[in-house]
Amino acid sequence: QAGLTQPPSVSKGLRQTATLTCTGNSNNVGNQGAAWLQQHQGHPPKLLSYRNNNRPSGISERLSASRSGNTASLTITGLQPEDEADYYCSAWDSSLRAWVFGGGTKLTVL
Amino acid sequence: QVQLVESGGGVVQPGRSLRLSCAASGFTFSGYAMHWVRQAPGKGLEWVAFISYDGSAKYYADSVRGRFTIARDNSKNTLYLQMDSLRVEDTAVYYCAREDRDFDIWGQGTMVTVSS
């Protein structure tokens, strides 16, 4: 099953802004949007944003999600050391009748 | 608190079977659909299977369809993944995750190693 496309890595400086992207097609991201998850090494993933771009309770306001066409984006402002992690997007694919993940983006905070 | 705890992982030979369990607590298990998601060592997340809140709908990834079976027992607040005809490429940490519009709650995972 085809997955979503994410850049393998992004590096930004402390207190800078990072924007992570996730590209799919009209059957997945373009249809219902993409959720975003964060995973620190050795830990399970954590939901950061629902497909409707809303944040779950307790998620920092420094994070915001958006979508334009078949591409979803996650913007993190004021980067902190704890933001260094792997970030995944996920979506329901109505054609495949399956959930699909992106390959993940490793965010490095310099 | 809301919690998912996986168990049943281990080392198994290719072609053998294994059953994973996921015990839910802190929420009304019978009201939520559930997923299994896996992560091979050093790799990304791969969705494996989905089951609706009442077990009436099930979906599988192409890579496991026909070999894995997802099931649930709402009376025991437990999710299962029966894995048959295991392959080396099934080696991964297996997570159960709650579906509340998206994968909102995750367990800690259980490691499955398929090796001769």
Image (spheres, rainbow, N blue to C red):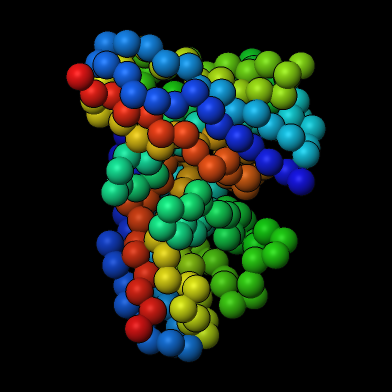
Q: Is residue A64 above or below residue A1?
A: below
Q: Residue furthest left?
A: B116
Residue at point 79%, 32% (across, down) = B28
Relative placement, left or right, of B26 versus A101 is: right
Can residue B62 be seen here? The reply is no
Placement of the C terminus of chain B among the 4 image quadrants: top left
Measuring from the top left, give residue A10's x and y in whole percent.
32, 72
Residue at point 68%, 16% (across, down) = B73
Residue at point 27%, 11% (across, down) = B15
Measuring from the top left, give residue A95's x and y in whole percent.
42, 33
Can residue B92 be seen here? The reply is yes
Measuring from the top left, give residue B112's x and y in whole percent.
38, 29
Q: Is residue B114 above or below residue A7?
A: above
Q: Is residue A98 above or below residue B83?
A: below
Relative placement, left or right, of B4 versus B38 is: right
How many discs appear? 0
Q: B28 or B62, which lies in front?
A: B28
Q: Is residue A48 above or below residue A82?
A: above
Q: A17 or B21, which lies in front?
A: B21
Measuring from the top left, give residue B29's x and y in whole percent.
74, 30
Relative placement, left or right, of A110 versus B78 is: left
Q: A67 or A77, which lies in front?
A: A77
